[in-house]
Image: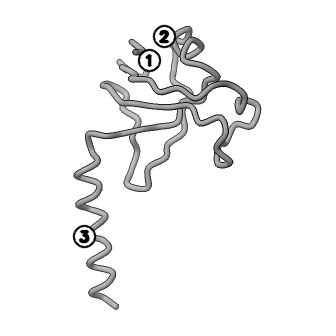
Amino acid sequence: MTAIITSVCSYAYLLNNFLRGYKMIVLNYKSKKELKENVGKALDYTETSIFGPEYLSNGNFCGCNRPFSPEFPKFHLRKGREFFAKVTMKEDLILKVS
């Protein structure tokens, strides 16, 4: 049993290191346009990783809106279109959206 747990932990560690450059969070906005209108404000997001936080207060990461996902936490925002965006943050504020 210990060998199985060690193996799973090792696999999780390797997967986390492999995926470190591929972070994807859920952006709680109805459209990419609405996200771009919030440049200069704090980001409304949902963490999705089991390996630790993906949000960066300074730096770049990718995100998407999943309006049809049953796990989407903010039901009043479930309407809208699915989109993907690269978000640049500086000091916990949205600097750029592309």
Q: In which quarter of the image is residue 56?
A: top left
The front one of 40 and 86 is 86
Residue at position x 34%, y 91% from top? 1
Mark 2 residue type: Val
Note whether 51 is above or below 31 in the view shown: below
Secondary element at tag 3: helix
- The residue where tag 2 is placed is 39
Q: Is mark 2 on a helix, strand or loop?
A: loop
Which residue is found at the position 28% from the left and 58% from the top? 15
Q: Where is residue 82 in the image (x, y as percent from the top left)?
A: 58, 29
Residue at the location (36% across, 20% down)? 88
Which mark is first along the chain, 2 or 1? 2
Q: Position of residue 48 (x, y in %)?
A: 49, 46
Q: Which of 93 and 76 is in front in this view?
A: 76
Q: How far apart are marks 1 and 2 (CA)?
A: 7 Å
**Residue holding disc 1:** 93
Relative to residue 29, is residue 62 drawn left or right? left
Amino acid on which the number 3 mark rests in the picture? Ser
Residue 72, disc: none
Callout 1 amino acid: Leu
First in sequence: mark 3 vs mark 2: 3
Which of the 4 image quadrants contains residue 80?
top right
Q: To which residue does mark 3 refer?
A: 10
Q: Residue 22 location in percent, x, y?
A: 31, 40
Q: Number of callouts in the render?
A: 3
